[in-house]
Amino acid sequence: MSKSRSSENILTGLRKSSRLPVVRAFAALCFVVILGIIFNADGAFFKWDTHRDMFRHISVFGILACGMTLVIITAGIDLSVGSILGLTAVLFSLFSIHLGWPPLFTIMVCLLAGLSCGLTSGFIIDRFKIQPFIATLAMMVFARGMAKWISGGQKISTAVIQADGTYKYVEAPAIFNIINSKIFHENIAVVTLIFLGCILICWLILSKLRWGRHIYAVGGNEEASRLSGIPVTATKLLVYGASGFLCAIAGICQAAQEFQGDPEAGMTYELTAIAIVVIGGTNLMGGTGGIGLTLIGAMTIGYLEKILSINAVGEASRLMLTGAIIVGAVLFQKYRK
């Protein structure tokens, strides 16, 4: 039997043994929407602005969750996504505002920085057989430290320090306004379109490309995949590289929305990204899941936070409720059979 046929047999077996929990993901989303209809804050939930702002708010987290989905399907985890976002947000603001680099060149450099961080994590995991949790934890600390070192521990904003120690306020580059703008009569945010573009690209990777089949196979059984001729090392490198690349996109969007690069940006964002993936239904054990589920998970988390926000529920209560929902989602996966 050829290697390609063996890999196809592995993938076919995985698909037969694990149904994507689309119905359960939609049920969770519908439940949250029903809560919004009931607790509508005097009709605020029924206004389009509420839904537009929800999508805008969740977009950065959703972009991180796209990369996290690819990683989790391979039975890995990436704790560094928030720190890489912070690093690229600092770089984007520094190069754009303070150094005046052209937007296209700045974006390319930031994407390369995110890609490099992801590839480094993947290389450490595969080459030295270190657990993804430990390797990406190390990258999380390193990238955060790098962001603080580059920025001097200060926010990179439109207030540019001069030689005499005074500050001069400059205009934000046009690219910031473009990314942060709303189009179609201000009915949809550009960052939301970027998020949906990332969803589409990841869907194409997972459903249409050979690399996507390799991702599922490696997550289902890494040793069997290796024996079947699947390039496990290359698959892992590409997955973690893609996660870092998507973190850079999220970092650029974050900087544009805040009109600054904050070295503290992205703190705990990895937890929200994991929550989106898990609530969507992608299995933490690897081998099953999908980017469509991540989109549903992002909407579920987004609507939940928005409903709590418009009903003036405090941040502490929102965090506790989100944590309880994550545990419930994992237990639901565990006992779904």
Image: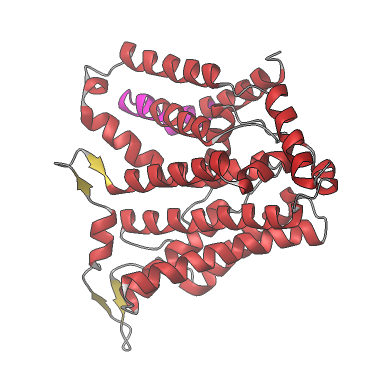
The stretch in magenta equals 305-320
Give the quarter of the image for residue 98.
Answer: bottom left
Q: Residue at x 30, y 84 (%)?
A: 162
For this view, does 228 lie left or right of residue 265? right
Q: Residue furthest top?
A: 38
Residue 195 at what x, y percent from top left?
40, 45
The chief SS type of the magenta part is: helix
Q: Is residue 102 visible?
A: yes
Q: Is residue 336 above or below residue 241?
A: above
Q: Quadrant of the C terminus?
A: top right
Q: Residue at x 33, y 43 (%)?
A: 192
Q: Residue furthest bottom?
A: 163
* Tally of numbered tags: 0
For this view, does 265 lie left or right of residue 42? right
Residue 88 at what x, y percent from top left?
47, 63
Q: Nearer the viewer, residue 192 or 213?
A: 213
Q: Residue at x 55, y 47 (%)?
A: 67
Q: Nearer the viewer, residue 166 or 273?
A: 273
The colour scheme applied to this rendered structure is secondary structure
Q: Quadrant of the N terminus?
A: top right
Q: Is residue 154 visible?
A: no
Q: Is 82 one of the magenta-colored residues?
A: no
Q: Is residue 293 above or below residue 206?
A: above
Q: Residue furthest left?
A: 185
Q: Is 316 one of the magenta-colored residues?
A: yes
Residue 287 at what x, y percent from top left?
70, 35
Give the quarter of the image for residue 327.
Answer: top right
Q: Is residue 107 above or below residue 72?
A: below
Q: Residue at x 56, y 23 (%)?
A: 325
Q: Nearer the viewer, residue 300 or 295?
A: 295
